[in-house]
Image (cartoon, rainbow, N blue to C red):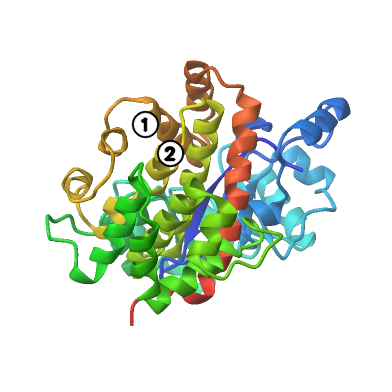
Amino acid sequence: MFAFIARQPILDRNKEVFAYELFFRDGKNNCYPEVERDEATSKLIAKNYQTLNLDDISCNKKSLINFQSETLMSGLPASLDPENVVVELVTGRNEDSSLLDVCKHVKNMGYKIALEDCRLKPSWDDFIPYVDMLKVNSNHENLDFFEKNVNRFIDANVQLIADKVETQQSFSIFRDMGFDYFQGYFFARPMSVSSKNIPTSKLTLVELMGASSSESFDIESINSVIEHDVGLSYMLLRFINNPMINKRYKITSLRHALNYMGEVEIKKFIALLALANLSDDKPLELLHLSLVRGRFCDLVGTEKNIGNNPPTAFLVGLFSLLDALLDQQMESLIEKLPLVDEVKEALCGGQNDLSMYLMLAKAFESGNWLKVIRISKILELDQKLLHSLFNEAILWGNGVRRSISPHFPATKT
């Protein structure tokens, strides 16, 4: 259905995903694309490039979508479900009076409405009966003004979304102020940076990371590590028997998996297994983001024929959030991990091919289409192909996430 799209998570007060805001490159101002797009072009995209539907994109969470007013007034596509889609309206595109008419019309169609505004001015009181959520820019300097004005929306059961929340401190400020949801990559930042040692309980996982980054592969030592940890054994088998990875055979052991999947793929899953266990007290979305980055960088590396043993492109994407997972500076952390030099360089902000793949992944995450265009030209890769690869990475990440979720605590007890 959609070929050119990005998503950004919106987390609740417990740092669990409530919804994703969707950004459409093939629509005006990142809005939902016009339905009358050329039919021949639509068929060509569907045939040649990986496309997604809303459930794929939002991983069965709610979707916040911007629409042009003209699209809303003419009726929304029947394929959209009011139970899962929140219509987002940006103030400033319309006069207040016409925007109020749009709100009434959308509300009558059964949709929830999120109004984006950073001022909380009294004139929005007229909108309260029709608006379910209000999104404000957390970068607004006047926090005292926010504190004095949020209660009238809270009292009216309008849920508040803080946008552009990029630090843990900002998250705490707006959570304490009474906000319900938070959009931005604050969860992908270390909570308090330190140079502490990696906990002894995690050292086994570091051993596995080293094995995934090495050209050699000692099946006996890796098998010994995993067999002596029931949790690792169980999660490895869940990963490898995930339908996104293996649709044909029931895998019963690491040795069986090695024979079926091959050394390179097993290295990737050992790295994934280690990362999942390192992040057991962090938001699940942090691991999910790492999964998508890892798969996307791997796919781009394959297109560029950089070689995959060790799977360096995959490791750069997968380990790109290690600093947030372990609350340490990346440079200090990387020195403690047995990674190859080109992976270390890319993770620490150096300039090489792998760092370019990671930059591209981040551009897709934020819907920075101009940056996507620029990097695609540098890499000499077709933009439509890159969109398709990113969509494939989302699907892969969703599938692996589903295999993790029932056994992955949201918070530590």
Question: What is the CA distance from the residue labelled 1 to the residue labelled 2?
Answer: 18 Å
Callout 1 environment at 10 Å: few (<14), some (14 to 19), or many (20+)? many
Q: Which of marks 1 and 2 is nearer the N terminus?
A: 2
- Residue sitting at x 38%, y 69%: 226
The residue pinned by badge 2 equals: 309
Query: Is 98 drawn above or below residue 349 in the view shown?
Result: below
Residue 86 is at least partly visible in this image: yes
Query: Is 193 drawn above or below residue 368 in the view shown?
Result: below
Residue 121 is at least partly visible in this image: no
Name the quadrant of the C terminus. bottom left
Nearest to the observer: residue 272 or residue 52: 272
Q: Do the residues bearing badges 1 and 2 touch, measured as CB atoms within 8 Å?
A: no
- Residue lying at the far right in this picture: please name it: 39
- Residue sitting at x 82%, y 32%: 42
Q: Where is residue 360 in the image (x, y as percent from the top left)?
A: 46, 32
Q: How many labels does the image show?
A: 2
Horizontal side, residue 219 vs residue 81: left or right? left
- Residue sitting at x 41%, y 69%: 13
The disc label shown at residue 198, or none: none
Nearest to the observer: residue 7 or residue 341: 341
The residue pinned by badge 1 equals: 355
Residue 44, by quadrant, is top right
Callout 2 environment at 10 Å: few (<14), some (14 to 19), or many (20+)? some
Give the amino acid type for the residue marked by disc 1 in the picture.
Ser
Name the quadrant of the N terminus. top right
Nearest to the observer: residue 389 or residue 1: 389
Query: Is 150 drawn above or below residue 101 in the view shown?
Result: below
- Residue sitting at x 68%, y 63%: 249
Q: Where is residue 203 in the image (x, y as percent from the top left)?
A: 23, 64
Give the amino acid type for the residue marked by disc 2 in the picture.
Asn
Q: Position of residue 157 (x, y in %)?
A: 54, 72
